Amino acid sequence: MPGFENTVQLEERLTRPLPSDVDFLRRLEGDLIVLGASGKMGPTLVRRIRRAADEAGKACRVIACSRTPPDCGEGVESVACDLMEPAEVARLPRVRNVVYMAGRKFGSTGNAELTWAANTVVPANVARHFRDSRIVVFSTGNVYPFVAAESGGSVESDDPAPVGEYAQSCLGRERVFEYYSRRFGTPCLFFRLNYAVDLLYGVLVDIARQVWENRPVDLAVPAVNAIWQGDANSYALRSLDLCASPPRVLNVTGPGIYQVRETAEYFAARFGRQLEFAGESARSALLSNSEACRAALGEPEISASQLLEWVACWVESGGASINKATHFQVTDGKF
């Protein structure tokens, strides 16, 4: 299979630092902690940072922190912390560089209070403790309104208009960090990501598996953004250089927009499958324009066409899956 024959090879590629990552670590001042490191992207980000530091000959601390921290291998410190508890946060080392990945999405419907607490109370605990750090705050394009696909996507200066309590709580997360950034002068960046694909999970994987398994492809959302997870992690690391007070906003995704119908047709032709659609195609979708990100941090390593090819090869060859849907078709904000 072109690219990857197994998850070991996939993991190696996801964590392989770019030359720009190594250059960044070479000039990085201070240590680095990833908060919420046990999520979908956290372990590969931490390992990429460690590999980049090693290649740069940088003897900085790389710390993976979460309630149950992942084992990220030699050279990475694992620290257990319930970020909801101020006393536990107070024991964390005050390092210069922070990547904040903690948050809650799925399960928000029916447990809205937990989602709001996770997405607003935890940021207050973290922002107070790391007031003297610079913080990249993972956020989401869900804070934007739905826009027409031909618009090219929302830009950073657009007013937020989140739909549903999950997206509203994500805007709440940004507002809490913004408050403390203005109060303490803490440099921050809001990393509005739409959407990372790692072959085990992602919007393109959802579409490919629906086609492969002869399931109807839902057209409720006509278009999506996607970016290779390795590129998203590289941007997350290097966007530490872009932190500011008041916080800077950065849309992070691939350079193109994937039309759901055309993407499904690509996979159907590739797999030799009959294609069936469901639902009526709407005129708008959650889409972000990433021109500012690419201007500041460079083009992603993996192109839109290469990512489609990797997804097709992975699904066609029976590659592993975490068996969790992204629910990118949701239009009412209920996750």
Image: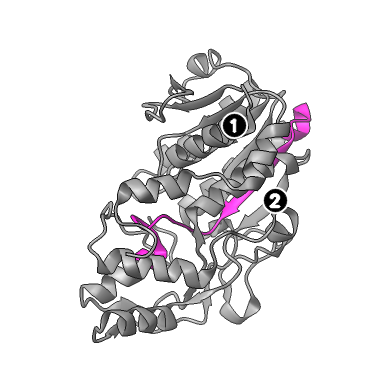
Q: Which residue is drawn at 58% across and 56% down?
A: 143
Instruction: Say if residue 175 shows up in the picture.
Output: no
Q: Is mark 2 on a helix, strand or loop?
A: strand
> Crowding near pointer 2: few (<14 within 10 Å), some, many (20+)?
many
- Residue denoted by label 1: 53
Q: Is residue 64 above or below residue 102?
A: above
Q: What residue type is labelled 1?
A: Ala
Between residue 17 and residue 184, name the one nearer to us. Answer: 17
User: Is residue 198 on the magenta stretch?
Assistant: yes
Between residue 166 and residue 65, name the one nearer to us. Answer: 65
Q: Is mark 1 on a helix, strand or loop?
A: helix
Name the side, left or right, on which 152 lies relative to 14: right
Name the side, left or right, on which 192 lies relative to 221: right
Instruction: Say if residue 143 shows up in the picture.
Output: yes
Q: Residue at x 63, y 43 (%)?
A: 21
Q: In this view, does 268 lie above or below 213?
A: below
Which x, y percent locates residue 315?
Answer: 28, 66
Q: Give the range drawn in magenta.
A: 181-205
Q: Do the residues labelled 1 and 2 touch (CB within 8 Å)?
A: no
Which x, y percent locates residue 98?
Answer: 61, 31
Which x, y percent locates residue 256?
Answer: 58, 72
Q: In which quarter of the image is the C terminus?
A: bottom left
- Residue denoted by label 2: 249
